[in-house]
């Protein structure tokens, strides 16, 4: 059953993509491989990863450390170029980073020398948007993310949860069709995490974004994702790709939730095991 | 309360030293030309500060203040410090930004910089007089050299330590290379640049005193050397105290400015 996992799981996904929001894939990841380092010490972070993501999907990339999920996200963002395969967004191959794929980093990456409102305005300012438009957008986003009282603060004076709200607002200012999120809530405490997850879902549903969300938390993936792709540990491949049909808001005490959780835990732990063995060997 | 207490404790050692100095000067072992009494120095300092002219009937304050020997000396010295610093830092900043951001520029300039950097600015005095004669030009030349290197090296280091995640974030938001430089790299390097500017300003102040002893005939450095010729050691010490006060004031101002510009920065110590 394990051995056939990856081939078997391509099947339930394909029809879903074709029946997606607008009937075609918005992000097409085609046979992507990524090798770091030189020959001899080379590490294959990704190997022949293919995923088609339709507009409006909330895809969680799930896996242990070292499974290449962040690498894949960075490749979609255009920060790194895959050593093999192609990634296309709206049919256009990706060559460099750009505001159509707004990235939210785990380390927030807010500009510490800018106030909250300046951070949010940054993307529009450098685009040369008229100041009336900038003001209106910033106002709206500060309201949406409950940041109005903090607008004049610098990031150092904000809690982790607040900072991540600012990071989300900063990306939303450019109204990207796609949001890429790299373990954005990984550093937050459980309650803050939970409330930000709910807020993100609210944003996803009301603004109709496509979200690719990297996490190693199974609960988080089930709570958020409309689809979950489990990646294997080195080299990263898609081990399992499944639609999550649970009704929202999702309740972690429901039997369906837990059945899925057990299933995913088994898949992820197999990979975690391989990761741990590698670590012991000092690879 | 605790602050007053700390302030008072901080006074103990200076007060004891002044008392010792006073006692020594009263023993008659040292002649007053060698060791004047603290009282004589204070008197001399006040005389040095006091405007020579009366305030004119149409209230020309500037002329009145300028008739104070100390204030006019301080003005000459500060002018040289600030102008020399502006030249030195003004050249160092763009070069440092380029060297920090672009490997090729770094390769071109780094060997020369490493060679010139350890040469004390004072070593250029003879050359500066040959090239520029006497007066402000050689002084400004020396001061600008003194402030150039601290600003340059810190700017290079500052640009190099910019966290790559800010660059990624900015590129993700659509920043081109010029925007990236102006709005991300320069502000991110600012803590280093300002630290360099503070060191550079300190160096400029050291160099101005030396330069005034040699190349010009105004300013605080010139004045204490002149006082020595007349064996006015009380005036020499009064001048030194003035230099110390102005140096401290300059550094405090720079620290305040830095604190304001870096108010976004975490873990800031002045």
Image (cartoon, coloured by chain):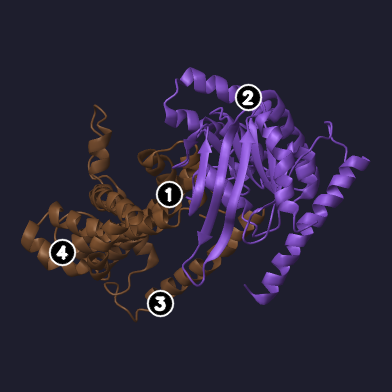
Chain colours: A purple, B brown
Quick check: can you spot residue A89?
A: yes
Cα gap from disc 2 to disc 3, whole angstroms? 95 Å
Q: Is residue B146 above or below residue A279?
A: above
Nearest to the observer: residue A78 or residue A237: A237
Labels 4 and 1 in the same subunit: yes
Cα gap from disc 2 to disc 1, whole angstroms? 47 Å
Which residue is at 19% across, 54% downward? B140
Cα gap from disc 4 to disc 2, whole angstroms? 81 Å
Look at the numbered disc 3 and give the secondary structure of its residue: helix
Label 2 sits on residue = A22
Label 4 sits on residue = B214
Give residue B190's mark.
1
* CB under 8 Å between discs 2 and 3: no
Label 1 Cα neighbours within 10 Å, binned few <14 / some 14-19 / many ≥20: many
Q: Chain of mark 2?
A: A
Nearest to the observer: residue B261 or residue A110: A110
* Sequence-first tag of 3 and 4: 3
Q: Is residue A184 above or below residue B233?
A: above
Label 4 Cα neighbours within 10 Å, binned few <14 / some 14-19 / many ≥20: some
* CB under 8 Å between discs 4 and 1: no
**Where is residue B75 drawn, in percent x and y?**
26, 47
Q: Nearer the viewer, mark 4 or mark 2?
A: 2
Q: Nearer the viewer, mark 2 or mark 3?
A: 2
Nearest to the observer: residue B56 or residue B117: B117
* CB under 8 Å between discs 1 and 3: no
Q: Nearer the viewer, mark 3 or mark 4?
A: 4
* CB under 8 Å between discs 3 and 4: no
**Where is residue A21 drawn, in percent x and y?**
66, 26
Look at the numbered disc 2 and give the secondary structure of its residue: loop
């Amino acid at each position: 059953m394990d051995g056939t996992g990856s081939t078997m799981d391509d099947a339930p996904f394909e029809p879903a993509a074709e029946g997606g929001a607008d009937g075609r894939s918005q992000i097409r990841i085609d046979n992507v491989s990524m090798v770091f380092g030189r020959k001899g010490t080379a590490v294959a972070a990704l190997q022949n990863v293919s995923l088609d993501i339709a507009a409006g999907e909330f895809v969680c990339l799930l896996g242990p450390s070292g499974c290449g999920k962040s690498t894949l996200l960075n490749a979609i963002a255009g920060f790194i170029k895959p050593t093999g395969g192609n990634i296309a967004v709206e049919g256009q191959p990706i060559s460099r980073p750009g505001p159509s794929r707004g990235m939210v980093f785990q380390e927030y990456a807010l500009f510490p020398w800018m106030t909250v409102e300046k951070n949010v305005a940054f993307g529009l300012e450098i685009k040369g948007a008229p100041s009336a438009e900038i003001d209106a957008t910033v106002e709206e986003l500060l309201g949406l993310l409950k940041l109005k009282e903090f607008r004049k603060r610098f990031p150092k004076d904000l809690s982790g949860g607040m900072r991540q709200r600012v990071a989300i607002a900063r990306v939303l200012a450019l109204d990207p069709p796609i949001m890429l999120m790299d373990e954005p809530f990984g550093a937050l405490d459980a309650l803050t995490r939970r409330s930000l997850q709910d807020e993100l879902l609210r944003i996803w549903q009301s603004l109709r974004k496509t979200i690719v969300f990297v996490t190693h938390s199974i609960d988080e993936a089930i709570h958020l994702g409309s689809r979950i792709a489990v990646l294997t540990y080195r080299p990263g491949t898609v081990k399992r790709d499944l639609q999550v049909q649970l009704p929202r808001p999702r309740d972690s005490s429901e039997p369906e939730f837990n059945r899925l959780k057990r299933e995913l835990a088994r898949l992820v732990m197999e990979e975690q095991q391989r990761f741990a063995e590698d670590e012991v060997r000092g690879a | 309360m605790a602050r007053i207490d700390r302030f008072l404790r901080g006074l103990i050692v200076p007060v004891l030293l002044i008392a010792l100095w006073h006692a020594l000067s009263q023993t008659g072992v040292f002649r007053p030309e060698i060791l004047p009494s603290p009282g004589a120095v204070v008197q001399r300092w006040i005389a040095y500060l006091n405007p020579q002219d009366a305030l004119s009937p149409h209230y020309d304050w500037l002329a009145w203040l300028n008739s104070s020997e100390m204030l006019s000396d301080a003005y000459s010295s500060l002018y040289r410090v600030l102008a020399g610093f502006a030249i030195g830092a003004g050249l160092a900043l763009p070069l440092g930004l380029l060297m920090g951001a672009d490997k090729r520029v770094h390769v071109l300039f780094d060997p020369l910089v490493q060679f010139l950097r350890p040469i004390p600015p004072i070593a250029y005095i003879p050359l500066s007089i040959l090239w520029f004669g006497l007066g402000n030009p050689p002084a400004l030349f020396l001061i600008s050299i003194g402030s150039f290197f601290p600003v340059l090296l810190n700017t290079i280091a500052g640009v190099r330590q910019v966290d790559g995640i800010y660059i990624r974030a900015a590129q993700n938001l659509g920043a081109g290379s010029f925007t990236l430089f102006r709005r991300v790299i320069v502000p991110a390097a600012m803590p280093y640049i300002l630290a360099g500017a503070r060191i550079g300003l300190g160096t400029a102040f050291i160099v101005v005193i030396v330069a005034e002893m040699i190349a010009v005939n105004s300013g605080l450095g010139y004045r204490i050397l002149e006082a020595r010729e007349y064996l006015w050691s009380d005036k020499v010490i009064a001048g030194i105290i003035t230099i110390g006060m102005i140096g401290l004031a300059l550094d405090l101002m720079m620290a305040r400015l830095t604190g304001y510009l870096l108010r976004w920065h975490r873990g800031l110590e002045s």
